[in-house]
């Protein structure tokens, strides 16, 4: 099945502090799932994290609201998962209540837990409250952003060397699946302009109950993914043609 026709599951948690669902750790990774450098969610969605070389601070996206992330497992097969704005807020609040701010590992390796890496800033982008993403970081409203102070010399050297490029959360999440007919991507047609695609995609998701900003973010993501896939095909064909000639 084509990726843009796969079912979409919304990831959720139980807010009970004694329930293990939620984010337990944040990993420093080389290829984060949110496609913004810097669940286990490595390597699906790229914006370099912002590093302050003077103060040894890295800032980046921890969760991106309403951004489809490709997954595949034996139970559900190929599918997408998304974190909604509301669920991200609940996840972040539980993360704070349980005091998990300094739970950090390297590349999701449970035994590789560095000292001297501490979260000192955690916030959700919320335009209604005047809380914006850092300059140059274009993310959807409701996305979770964090900053870490790196006092560990070895870790900072690896960040400067480009070994780590972003954050990746890990934890336990419940899957919620709605009406299958409306939980599908709308596929951009060949040579369809972004404005034409948006004009039919956004109303579809608004009718599905999404807020307008959520619908716009999802449709932009789908169009960008389709364009990127077409560009890859063109590149491969060009290489094959050059070999044959």
Image: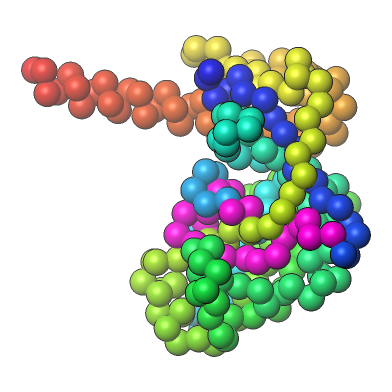
Q: Tell me, what colour scheme is on the image? A: rainbow
- Of 115 and 125, which appears nearest the observer? 115
Question: In this picture, is 68 found above or below 98?
Answer: above
Residue 76 visible (yes or no): yes
Quarter holding residue 55: bottom right
Quarter holding residue 57: bottom right
Q: Which residues are magenta?
A: 19-40
**In percent of the image, x 58 and y 51: which residue is there?**
41
Q: How many marks?
A: 0
* Residue 219 colored in magenta in the image: no
Q: Position of residue 227 (x, y in %)?
A: 48, 27
Q: In this rendering, would 122 be left or right of 40?
A: right
Q: Position of residue 64 (x, y in %)?
A: 68, 49
* Residue 20 colored in magenta in the image: yes
Residue 126 visible (yes or no): no
- Of 103 and 203, which appears nearest the observer? 103
- Of 77 and 10, which appears nearest the observer? 77
Quarter of the figure with the C terminus? top left
Q: In this rendering, would 183 be left or right of 130?
A: left
**In percent of the image, x 33 and y 23: which residue is there?**
234
Question: In this picture, is 150 found above or below 200?
Answer: below
Q: Position of residue 53 (x, y in %)?
A: 49, 79
Question: In this picture, is 11 found above or below 113?
Answer: above
Q: In this rendering, would 109 be left or right of 14?
A: left
**In percent of the image, x 57 and y 36: which residue is there?**
73
Taking the view exactly as shown, the residue that stands out farthest to the front is: 74
Q: Position of residue 205 (x, y in %)?
A: 78, 24
- What secondary structure prevails in the magenta region? loop
Taking the view exactly as shown, the residue that stands out farthest to the left is: 245
**In percent of the image, x 11 and y 18: which residue is there?**
244
Q: In this rendering, would 236 be left or right of 150?
A: left
């Amino acid at each position: 099945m084509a990726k843009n026709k796969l079912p979409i599951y919304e990831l959720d948690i139980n807010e009970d502090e004694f329930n293990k669902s939620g984010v337990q750790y944040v990993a420093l990774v080389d290829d984060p799932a949110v496609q913004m450098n810097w669940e286990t969610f490595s390597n699906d969605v790229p914006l370099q994290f912002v590093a302050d070389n003077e103060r040894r601070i890295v800032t980046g996206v921890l969760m991106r609201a309403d951004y489809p992330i490709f997954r595949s497992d034996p139970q559900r097969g190929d599918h997408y998962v998304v974190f909604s704005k509301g669920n991200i807020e609940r996840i972040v609040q539980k993360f704070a209540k349980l005091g998990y701010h300094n739970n950090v590992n390297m590349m999701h390796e449970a035994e590789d837990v560095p000292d001297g890496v501490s979260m000192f800033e955690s916030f959700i982008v919320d335009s209604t409250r005047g809380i914006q993403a850092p300059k140059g970081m274009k993310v959807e409203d409701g996305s979770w952003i964090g900053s870490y102070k790196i006092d560990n010399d070895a870790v900072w050297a690896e960040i400067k060397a480009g070994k780590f490029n972003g954050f990746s959360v890990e934890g336990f999440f419940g899957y919620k699946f709605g009406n299958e007919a409306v939980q599908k991507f709308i596929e951009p047609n060949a040579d369809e302009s972004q404005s034409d695609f948006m004009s039919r995609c956004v109303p579809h998701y608004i009718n599905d109950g999404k807020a307008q900003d959520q619908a716009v973010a999802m449709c932009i993501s789908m169009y960008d993914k389709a364009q990127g896939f077409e560009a890859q095909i063109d590149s491969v064909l060009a290489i094959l043609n050059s070999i044959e000639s």
